[in-house]
Amino acid sequence: MASSAALSPSIVEYFEGQDFYRCGYCKNESGSRSNGMWAHSMTVQDYQDLIDRGWRRSGKYVYKPVMNQTCCPQYTIRCRPLQFQPSKSHKKVLKKMLKFLAKGEISKGNCQDEPMEPTMEDAVASDFALINKLDIQCDLKTLSDDLKESLKSEEKEKGKSSKREESNELIQSQDMEEKLDSGEPSHSVKVHTVPQPGKGADLSKPPCRKAKEIRKERKRLKLMQQSPGGELEGIQVQCQPPSLFPPKAKSNQPKSLEDLIFESLPESASHKFEVRLVPVSLEDPEFKSSFSQSFSLYVKYQMAIHQDPPDECGKTEFTRFLCSSPLEAENTPNGPDCGYGSFHQQYWLDGKIIAVGVIDILPYCVSSVYLYYDPDYSFLSLGVYSALREITFTRQLHEKTPQLSYYYMGFYIHSCPKMKYKGQYRPSDLLCPETYVWVPIEQCLPSLENSKYCRFNQDPEAVDEGRSKEPDRLQVFYKKAIMPYGVYKKQQRDPSEEAAVLQYASLVGQACSERMLLFRS
């Protein structure tokens, strides 16, 4: 896995104007509006900064709703796991899972009052058709062989020169040409290898636990980790042995999330259950060996839950949508043991996969991308259960990486009743669509009751602090060269070119515009 120093810059191709498409929420045929770009490659820091400005990815397509125009405004929502306490309904789901695993009991009641898919990515409608179209638009094989050769030669020259002038300098990344080629998933999927998640990520300490209990817990964890069983299983269940469970809470103390999830099962338990964190990479043995089973589960889910016809949930769509990520795998000394990047969190029951949560692990958060599961196990409320597991996982990662302390749940859509469930995972915040500051959801709801679109920041003088202030400093990748936009625009005579670039700069902000490379043909 690449270190932060060896990472090549993000390369994006922005699509001028706005996309109009059918809304998947209110079914308006052309009411959903967004801006979008194709990410040929992207660093985890750039993506973190983009989602903190309202962007979201679907495969390699990264989009941002036009909030004041789209029919169903989509507000970025994040949960604060360190302060999270499970509600009664959450505890009900966790206890239901434990009863099923321990005794094989199946709840007779229906689960209609519980959200079916709490971690589903609220991606643009008609994702597959859109991404197929972009495959053609983004086919960078149109780059000439001469340009590719120039990229290689420029990389050699880069190592020889120590200083360069801003106006004519060519800054080339070691594998930029490879990243450009891999931007078209219709030919081949090139994903990056992430090392196997390591052992030893301790359980996150519940916020209200006493110091004495924490010390006892750590001692027990240490002893259990040294046992042969714990050592063998440690990699498979979120960097933690499945037999490791915190001591039960005292009767006068409410059980923590970890207490409920990792409660010890009897030796005679009816089912064996484990959660595996697998990097999204066809070069990873575990991902590759489970690909066929994971794909079959995806098809079963799409056809049963979303009534997709078979030709719309094939292997190509599955790969583009859920296995093709622009994120560069990255490992840093102070980062999580499993590294940053895109992962599949597989839920195994008695040797088979019953659910897969697609997640991105970023510098400050775990970002939920999508969830698909076996409809035969809907009685387990796997949507709710997986969300609670991901919140717990975020708390675990926080132990090693303190700045990683949020769980992003995609978009909150107040105008769509079936999408309001995300507000139940509290405390949580919504992103102000104008100033890009986080506001507690409780302060936002009264305004959303009166209007679909709202500016949550109550300070009328507040502005977007990360806005584009110096567009000439934006980085452009054009004809084998990386140059500031101030240099690039002198070579252009098309007036529409400037409008497109300035629109892009305003949406990604100053910091990303100076780091990411805007590809121009």
Image: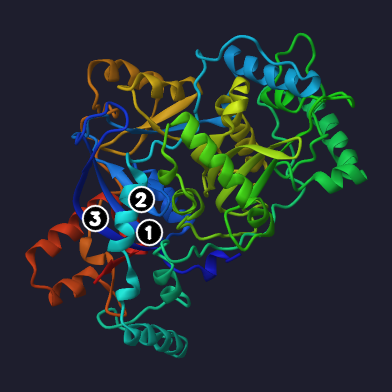
SS state under label 2: strand
Q: Determine the image quadrant of residue 139.
A: bottom left
Tell me if I can see residue 55 in this picture.
Answer: no
Query: From mark 1 to mark 2, how far is it between C-alphas?
Result: 7 Å
Q: Earlier in the sequence, mark 2 or mark 3?
A: 2
SS state under label 1: strand
Would you place residue 41 above or below residue 316 in this image?
below
Few, some or many residues within 10 Å of mark 3 (<14, 14–19, 20+): many
Three-letter residue code for mark 1:
Ala
| Position of residue 80 measured from the top left corner of the image (x, y, whole percent) | 52, 30
Tell me which residue sits at (48%, 57%) in the image: 327
Tell me which residue sits at (76%, 41%) in the image: 240
Three-letter residue code for mark 3:
Tyr
| Position of residue 259 measured from the top left corner of the image (x, y, whole percent) | 74, 23
- The answer to whether the residues at label 1 and label 2 have Cβ atoms under 8 Å apart is yes
Query: From mark 1 to mark 3, how far is it between C-alphas?
Result: 13 Å
Q: Determine the image quadrant of residue 312.
A: top left
Q: Nearer the viewer, residue 310 or 452?
A: 310
In the image, which is nearer the foreground, mark 2 or mark 3?
A: 2
Which residue is the site of mark 1? 39
Q: Nearer the viewer, residue 498 or 359?
A: 359
Three-letter residue code for mark 2:
Val
Q: Which mark is residue 520?
A: none
Q: Determine the image quadrant of residue 16.
A: bottom left
| Position of residue 425 measured from the top left corner of the image (x, y, whole percent) | 51, 23
Q: Which mark is residue 504?
A: 3
Few, some or many residues within 10 Å of mark 2 (<14, 14–19, 20+): many
Which residue is the site of mark 2? 62
SS state under label 3: helix
Would you place residue 204 above or below residue 179 in this image?
above
In the image, which is nearer the foreground, mark 1 or mark 3?
A: 1
